[in-house]
Amino acid sequence: MTGTLYLAGVLSSLTEQLKSRRALSGEHVSAAIKGLTAESVSPEAKAEFLTALALKGETVEEIAAFARELRELSLMPPLDPALRAGEILDVCGTGGDKLNTFNISTSVAILVAAAGVPMAKHGNRAITSKSGSADVLEALGIPVDNTPEQAAALLKEHNFAFFMATRFHPAFKHIGPARKLCATVGQRTIFNFLGPLMNPARPTAQLVGVPNPLLTEPMARVLQSLGIRRGMVVSGMAEGAYLDELSTMGDNQVAEFYQDRGFHTSVWQPEFLPLQPATLADLAGGDAQVNAVIVSLVLSGDERGPKRDAVLLNAAAALHVANKVKSLIEGWELAAEIIDSGKATAKIKALATR
């Protein structure tokens, strides 16, 4: 009981610090994580802390510190050394754009794996959307609750493995209720940022989408500080809002870094690609079953409208980040070839029938 009161008291003290707009040190973050992962501290107290941190605005240093601390608590898959020596990619949006698009990143993950890139997809069930990556993969018949050993074997054999956050981060068990409390009132938390940063496979390359262009450079700096070799963080404008994906409909804010080219930011429109006119309504998704149908149609080549364009654009960027291609145009063409050849659909079938 004394320990419970102590942890609750520390978290409460840190919450008050955040409310006064004072940043957390590394020691503060360590103490906060002890409180957040303790079963004995109430979800309400945890939600209040997470809300205060979000309202203050998370710094690069705070996000990186949370990621490092929590990664140390995760389960590590026994990856093949040869696989580990090459590029391992993850593609993930942080969520939080509230635009209810279909699962673009998950579509891209399957497509890129079919192109021969090892794809370690880290994700969860829906928290702030109707369909999380785990939900839509499961609706496609692809098992998602893999053990560390199963995930490592799948990545080696199929170039695709799903790393369920709740399986690989047992400490999350006691944070989930607080996140749901925040989600019910529309409050994002630092865990929206942390999801892409805590992949237990420790990918070497990442494409991350964020719902605010001002977050692209800070998130890229965090990725770089965590040892990612090749990274791109994007936020795409669509009808005055921002997708946590690259957008075919407007400006894209991009922050990227590569071992051989350093760090740089840019704003660009994909006008050099053969895009069709599109609206946000064209990218609308639904629940897991609806989105599974959409993903299947896109990856089979039967869907050839704006949804296909959105997947091809983001897949092009993913292939570039993974060093599979040298340009977005080359990536677009390769992604289209993988779909039209039937390889993407074959990848779904292989993963679903293993």
Image: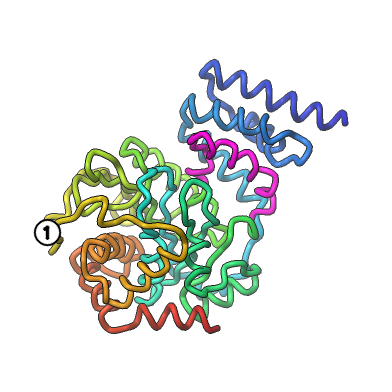
Residue 32 percent location from the top left of the image: 66, 33
Q: Residue at x 43, y 63 (%)?
A: 89
Q: Is residue 90 left or right of residue 200?
A: left
The residue that disc 1 covers is 272
Q: Residue at x 53, y 48 (%)?
A: 127
Quarter of the image with the N terminus in it: top right
Closer to the camera in the image, 31 or 9: 9
Magenta span of residues: 169-194
210 inside magenta stretch? no
Q: Residue at x 51, y 79 (%)?
A: 352
Question: Against 119, is 41 above or below?
Answer: above
Question: Against 203, is 66 above or below?
Answer: above
Instruction: Please name the predominant secondary structure of the magenta segment in the image.
Output: helix
Residue 56 percent location from the top left of the image: 49, 24
Residue 150 percent location from the top left of the image: 62, 74
Q: How many numbered marks are there?
A: 1
Closer to the camera in the image, 227 or 158: 158
Asked which quadrant contains residue 146, the reply is bottom right
193 inside magenta stretch? yes
Residue 77 percent location from the top left of the image: 62, 66
Closer to the camera in the image, 121 or 181: 181
Asked which quadrant contains residue 148, the reply is bottom right
Type of amino acid under label 1: Phe
Question: Against 31, is 317 above or below?
Answer: below
